[in-house]
Amino acid sequence: MDIVFSAATVAYGSRTALQPLDLQLSEQRIGVVGLNGSGKTTMARLINGLVKPTAGTVTVGGLDTVGDEQAARGKTGFIFQNPQHQMILPILAEDIAFGLKNRGLGKVEIAERTEAVLDRFGISHLARRRVHELSGGETQLGAIASVLVTGPELLILDEPTNQLDLKNRALIERTIAGLPEQVLVITHDLDLIEQFDRVLVFHEGRLAADDRPAEAIRAYREIAAC
Ligand SMILES: Nc1ncnc2c1ncn2[C@@H]1O[C@H](COP(=O)(O)OP(=O)(O)OP(=O)(O)O)[C@@H](O)[C@H]1O
C-alpha cells in the first residue's frame, strides 16, 4: 500500500514536532529510528489519522487521512508503546472479538476468526487469560492478534520490543518477519530492522536519512554521537 506525505507538518501549539515532510512509502518492511522526541511517533500517528496534519496531507492507499478519515483508518492497525493500555476487555479472546463485534459481524464468524488468529500467533492457550496478567511478550502477541484480526493492510508498531527480554525480542522479531501484512516499526532496537527494506531516520522533526538499513543506521549513529 502506498503511504504518501505531501508537505505534511505537525505543530503542537507553537512547537513544530514535524517539519514539512514529503515522502512516499510502499515497501513491505519500513523501520523508523531517531533520538527521543525526534518526531517518529508523530509521523506514524499521521498515517492512521490519530494526529492530523497542521498543514499538508497524508494519504494511505489513496485515501486522505482527514477527508476519508474512517476508510483510511481501517487500512491501518496500530500497536502503541504500552499495548496493555489498548486492550479494552479483561479476557484476551474477548478483547480480540471486541474489534469484530464493532464491525457488526455475527457470533459464529467472530468465534471462528478469533480462534484462527489466536492459532496463527500460537497463543490459543492464552485465550481465556486476563490481559493484565500476560507477560510482555504475550501482551505484544495478543495486541498484534487483536489488531490484525480486523484485517488492516498495514501494521504500525511503536517500540514493540521495548521492555522485552532477549528471548521475547527474538520471538517478536520472528513474528514481525513472518507477517504477510505491510509493517512500519518505530524502534530503538536496531537488530529488529536490520533486514528491513527501508529505514527512515528522524532528527529534530525532520527526515535526516532514508536508506537501506546499514546506511541509515550508520547515519543514525553519527547523529547520536553529536
Ligand atoms: N500531544 C503532544 N503535545 C505537545 N507536544 C507533543 C505531543 N506529542 C509529541 N509532542 C512533542 O513533539 C515532539 C516529537 O514527539 P514524538 O513523540 O513524535 O517523538 P518520538 O521521536 O516518537 O520520541 P520517543 O522516541 O521519545 O518516543 C517532542 O518534542 C514531543 O515533546
Image (spheres, rainbow, N blue to C red):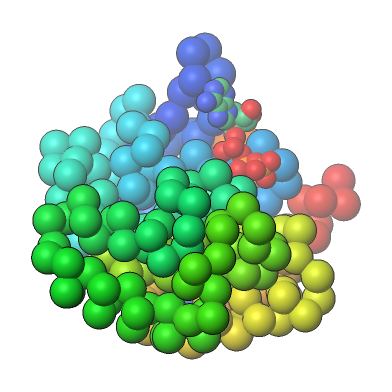
For this orientation, the residue located farthest to the right is: 225
Say if 15 sits above or below 102 in the image: above
Q: Quadrant of ligand 1?
A: top right
Say if 149 sits above or below 131 in the image: below
Q: Position of residue 75 (x, y in %)?
A: 25, 59
Q: Is residue 76 left or right of residue 105?
A: right
Q: Position of residue 52 (x, y in %)?
A: 33, 32
Q: Quadrant of the N terminus?
A: bottom left
**Which quadrant of the view contains residue 56?**
top left
As rendered, which of 200 and 112 lies closer to the eye?
A: 112
Residue at left offset 72%, top offset 75%: 168
As rendered, which of 148 and 209 lies closer to the eye?
A: 148
Question: Is residue 225 in view from this perspective?
Answer: yes
As rendered, which of 176 and 54 lies closer to the eye?
A: 176
Residue at left offset 48%, top offset 58%: 91
Q: Is residue 225 left or right of residue 78?
A: right
Q: Position of residue 141 (x, y in %)?
A: 54, 71
Question: Is residue 210 in view from this perspective?
Answer: no
Residue at left offset 80%, top offset 57%: 222
Q: Position of residue 98 (x, y in %)?
A: 31, 55
Residue at left offset 52%, top offset 12%: 14
